[in-house]
Image: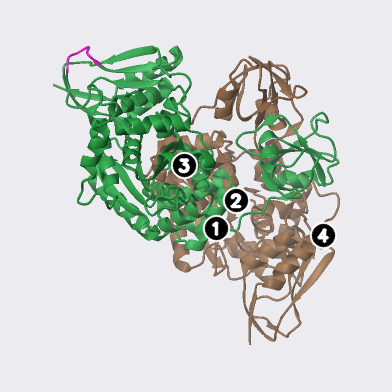
Chain colours: A green, B brown
Amino acid sequence: MLKIRRLAIDTHPENTAFLPRQGNGYSAEQFQALRKIRITGESAEILATLALVDEPALVEAGEIGLGEQAFRRLGLPEGAAVSIEQAPVPASLESVRRKIDGDTLDESEIAAIIRDVAGHRYSPMEIGAFLVACAGFMSTEETLAMTRAMAAVGNRLDWHAPLVVDKHCIGGIPGNRTSMIVVPIVAAHGLIIPKTSSRAITSPSGTADTMEVLANVDLREDELRAIVSREKAVLAWGGRVNLSPADDVLISVERPLRIDTFEQMVASILSKKLAAGSTHLVLDIPVGPTAKVRSQSEAVRLRKLFEHVADKLGLVIDIVLTDGSQPIGRGIGPVLEARDVMAVLRNDADAPEDLRDHALMLAGRVLDFDPALKGGRGFARALELLASGAALEAMERLIAAQGRQPAEFKPGAHIQEICAPRDGRVIAIDCHRIARIARLAGAPMDKGAGIDLVCKVGAEVRKGQALYRIHAQSATGLGFAHDLAREDAGYEIVR
Amino acid sequence: MLKIRRLAIDTHPENTAFLPRQGNGYSAEQFQALRKIRITGESAEILATLALVDEPALVEAGEIGLGEQAFRRLGLPEGAAVSIEQAPVPASLESVRRKIDGDTLDESEIAAIIRDVAGHRYSPMEIGAFLVACAGFMSTEETLAMTRAMAAVGNRLDWHAPLVVDKHCIGGIPGNRTSMIVVPIVAAHGLIIPKTSSRAITSPSGTADTMEVLANVDLREDELRAIVSREKAVLAWGGRVNLSPADDVLISVERPLRIDTFEQMVASILSKKLAAGSTHLVLDIPVGPTAKVRSQSEAVRLRKLFEHVADKLGLVIDIVLTDGSQPIGRGIGPVLEARDVMAVLRNDADAPEDLRDHALMLAGRVLDFDPALKGGRGFARALELLASGAALEAMERLIAAQGRQPAEFKPGAHIQEICAPRDGRVIAIDCHRIARIARLAGAPMDKGAGIDLVCKVGAEVRKGQALYRIHAQSATGLGFAHDLAREDAGYEIVR
């Protein structure tokens, strides 16, 4: 047995254990070959990467040093006795190998893989191999099994209500911050809509990032439940409540590898909705040349997959294919988007019309789930709730319930105008490009960073007229973003 | 700038850098998000994983601690000034992503990937993604490009001779240690055969492991050259001479993921041969139900791929499809195989006939490359050189030149007989199973561990009669192997 010594070494995101090379009761060379070990205490165990140490100041014979992550995750006190051994190879890796060879896996095999992934028993290399093998080919049954398995691991919210609605967009369109308009409208109507969102992964802002400009989004499960029972709604970050944790692990590998298949998308989104306790979902799939879905035929394939899997899971889904040809609204980045959202909710005369119309359409579709609103009366009801100020009131109550931000965030003060290089008409805006420029400016980490669009598709512009303004909180961020915009501003202008 | 401090922390196989969280002149949170950094000194640079430290005893403000691997690979003295920055993302990853999406890559893209892999600029996750994507589909042109790119990175031996022969087996058949018989026969004839081999990766022994029972195989390039110029031959471990280093990196990921495609096999083997300066190669492809190649049609596909790529590379190749239905020889594991090899070379009456015949056939095919031996007279010449003792003499000279092992290795003293469960005839032996049992016994790390076969396919056995003996150097190893053999001994016996 070895005694735990806590070391102030931050080895994020990995667990690392530091073992003295001499006198640890184990053959160091043996462990050297192993590299990954299992540390077992009386009531807990973790896997960790092993480093062998010859510095007596750090760890002494009979001790095992744990870096911060390993110490916290093991959760035992300093001095507690643990044993170590070679980390076992997860049996489910055999199924991953079969998948690499082109086999189709059954439900129990996929469930075992997902459990091991969520339990951090796979290395990033192994997760990457699984994902790439799935990217090669994945059957509808495999996608269903994966969704089910992902929802089954981790927390599962139950609202004890027959109708729990949700609205989701697959993403990819900058500025498309409709959830923050749809949720207050639906809450004002009285349906339960406990919306948990992610933070931005590759985009300039996620709903959680933008909502955070106005209110606290980092809620514990008990806080979340209390708010929903009072307000019918919430606009929270989902990270705290441990919904479909396998999804978070998979995304941590999908992101750097930029794996972005329809099957993973369906499993990711629907597993989160299932775990969040939703019964009815409106799903927004924007289609456009620079959107995630490029063509109508791709969109139809994706819709069928979503419908098939949702149906088997007992989730009612209404899928809307929408115009994803350009950004929606004006602001891109947390502060600028929050400004647009509040302008729509306040019925400001200069609120961006496309954002308002898009949100109203989606809110209408969500309200159509209410049996009381028969025959497609959802849209009219949504319009009424927005125009009357009921939605704004619901939003203000939500902000107060979640905890209003003490200080107001401002758009970044470092500003650069990007201007039309010639006279003509704007015929296309590249969503990817705009998103990258906004990210380089500092979004979403710098809340005030981003892009404020002046011209949209269809606008007639004169040479030198502003197309958009880049906002940044530092000169460096502005410089990076400006360099990228100078290379290609993302606008196509023809005479 | 930071000053290097050498830390006695072994973080094999990774480079790890330890940076104080405070007062390092960089924002720690910034680097936390980065994790992987580039450390640049006056004349050298490395990539390393970052750990943030709050232990002043380990590193102080203004210093950067380097673990053993990082310190050695950077190669700068303690106290030298270095700067750090986020490790750049290799541009070639964009091609990997396209490959994941199902695209075909061109020669320059594959070359860029291989250079970055060999330069340790890819994470294991990224290498795994690339390999799995290639396992999904890889064109013949891609395989050729990969082989060429792998051979181009690293060392390339040149023997300044028009005819440099080699013999290789794709592996998978336990006991098939023919190289140690073929090489002395060919050397005795006078052709140049500088054979570099790998150590076992997943098998109970590689040629380098078995040869090491008799002689030193860990030779520097100058030693290798000196021996070949005197003896025409060598039987060395290839790891020291840096041939196709990308192959070693790829294998380090292929092995845990057990990726084993024909395309990777062709690129791996032919890139090593090209880098080793071979001009003519005899390649042994065993075909059998438990071999790497399971059917004649698979074998023909693999042969065509080898022939196509070798032809484009200007390498003359003679491919022999051989009987891979059971182990060859009797001993499996370094010491037991070395015993068989020497018995054949000494023309012992009880030397395993199948090993002798197989080696003679292959040696004959190699000798057929000699223009002086016209009309397929290679086999007769091989037989003559073996029978006359010339091959044994050549082997003894090789052993002496490489450095004879000072002490004799013995078969493991812990022995377990595995017996026939019934009367009948042996109709099949499972190569995989036998290999796994031998590995669990301790081979190849424990040189004396392994299996000694008593009965081969076709033998009539009585219940209780020994099929094979497991040798181990420890009771633990013997126990592991015996457990596996009890579950399934790997023999099929019918009445």
Q: Is residue B399 magenta?
A: no
Residue A254: image tag: 3
- Left or right: B227 with respect to A63? left
Amino acid type, callout 1:
Ala
> Mark 4 = which residue?
B473
**Residue numbers of the magenta segment:** A461-466
- Left or right: A466 with respect to B358? left
Q: Nearer the viewer, mark 1 or mark 3?
A: 1
Amino acid type, callout 3:
Glu
Q: Nearer the viewer, residue B102 or B248?
A: B102
> Which of marks 3 and 1 precedes in the sequence?
1
Residue A91 occupies which quadrant of the picture?
bottom right
* Distance between mark 2 and mark 1 Cα atoms: 19 Å
> Mark 1 = which residue?
A112
Q: Measuring from the top left, give residue A462's x and y in whole percent.
A: 17, 14
Overall secondary structure of the magenta section: loop
Name the element at disc 4. loop
Residue at the image position 71 percent from the left and 63 percent from the top: B438
